[in-house]
Image (cartoon, rainbow, N blue to C red):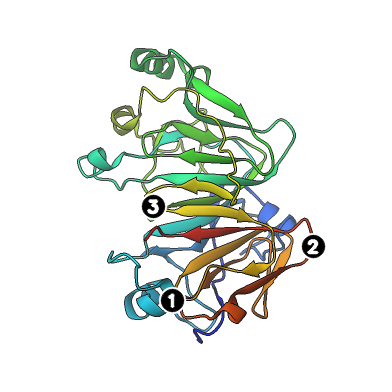
Amino acid sequence: MFLDQPILFPPIHQSRVWGGRRMETLLGQTLPDAITPFGEAWAVSDRPEAQSTTADGVTLHELWTNHRAEVFGENAPSSERFPLLMKILDACDDLSIQVHPPAHMAAALKGEPKTEMWFIAHADPGAKIYAGLKNGKTQADFEKALQDGTVAEVVHVIPARTGDCLFIPSGRVHAIGAGLLIYEIQQNSDTTYRVFDWNRVGLDGKPRELHVQQSLQSIDYADFEPTVQKIEPDGTLVRCEYFDVRLCENAGPVGKPGEGVTVAVVHGAINVGGTVMKAGDFALIPACLNDEAREVTPADIKTRWLEIRIPG
C-alpha cells in the first residue's frame, strides 16, 4: 500500500431485515449473494467485528495505529481507534424506532454514545424520516403510546427528499423510513436501542430484540420537531464536536497538505489526483499528499461528494 494516493476500502455489506438491493442497482456494488437483503455497507470502519481493509490487506486500524500523522494529520485525536464509522444504508422498509444513549448515560447502560448524521442520496416519492417528538408530547405520552402500539403517532415525521441532511445527536428518538438510500456519518459506536419495531420478525423468523428500558432512559423528551439541516455557503451540512461534513461540487484540491480528509461520492464520479471514484466509494485522502495529488475533477455538473473531517 502506498500513502501517495487516496486509500480506498471495499465495503463490508451487512444483511438486515429492512434492507434491499439498491447498493447493487443504484451504486453498482457487488453484493455477497443474489438473494439476501443488504441494509448496510460499512465503508470506513475500525470496529473489531468489521474492519475496513485495503485491497492489499492493510486495515484501517493499522493505519490509525502505525501511520496516524501521515494519513490523518498531526492533530488527529489520541483515541485507540479511528473515531468515526461511515456507512451507506438501503432502507426498503421502515427501520425500528430507536435511540442512541447520550454520553453521560452510555456507560451506565453498558453502551457507547452515538451522534450521527444522514445525507439522503436517494428518496422514493413519499419517503419519510422520523426524528424527535411531536410538539407537546411528554414522556408519559410516549410510554402510553408504547403500550398501545402507537409510537409512530407521537414521533415527529419529516418528508424526505434527495439531498436532505438530518443531524441525529445522541438521545434523539428516530427512524429511517422505507425508500431511502442514506450516507451515515457517526461516532465509532454500534449501540442502538430499539424501542418499537412495527411488530416485525427478523430474518430468522423471530421477533427482534427490543431495548425498552434503555431507550426510555436515553430519549431526550425535550427534543421537539427537528428540521433538516440548512447547507451553509461553504457547503457545510453538519459541524459538531465529532465530525465536520461538507457537500462539495466544485473542482479543486481536497483540503490542504497536512490535513487528512475522507471523501465519499454521493452522485456521479470524480478523479482525485488520478484515482477515479464513483458514487458509493469512500477514500481517505492522506495528510501527507501535496496539492497536486489532492486535486478533484468532477465528471459533470451533477456530481456531488462529501468531505468528512475530524475536528482538530
Residue at (58, 68) in percent of width and height? 254
**In the image, residue 164 above or below residue 195:** below
How many C-alpha atoms fall within 10 Å of the one at disc 1: few (<14), some, or many (≥20)?
many
Q: Which residue is mark 2?
A: 300
**In the image, residue 17 above or below residue 174:** below
Secondary structure state at the residue bearing disc 2: loop
Q: How many angstroms separate mark 3 from mark 2 (CA)?
A: 31 Å
Q: Which residue is mark 1?
A: 71
Secondary structure state at the residue bearing disc 1: helix
Looking at the rendered structure, the kind of residue marked 3 is Tyr
Res. 76 in view? yes
State the image coordinates of residue 172 (x, y, percent, origin top left). 41, 33
From this viewpoint, which residue is outermost toward the left?
108
Looking at the rendered structure, the kind of residue marked 2 is Asp
Question: From the viewer's perspective, is 181 left or right of 13?
Answer: right
**In the image, residue 20 above or below residue 76:** above
Looking at the rendered structure, the kind of residue marked 1 is Val
Q: How many angstroms separate mark 3 from mark 1 (CA)?
A: 18 Å
State the image coordinates of residue 253 (x, y, percent, origin top left). 61, 70
State the image coordinates of residue 10 (x, y, percent, origin top left). 57, 70
The label shown at residue 242 is: 3
Question: From the viewer's perspective, is 19 left or right of 106?
Answer: right
**In the image, residue 141 above or below residue 284:** above
Residue at (56, 53) in percent of width and height? 246
- Compare marks 3 and 2 and give the one earlier in the sequence: 3
How many C-alpha atoms fall within 10 Å of the one at disc 2: few (<14), some, or many (≥20)?
few
How many C-alpha atoms fall within 10 Å of the one at disc 3: few (<14), some, or many (≥20)?
some
Quarter where residue 13 is shown? bottom right
Residue at (41, 47) in percent of width and height? 240
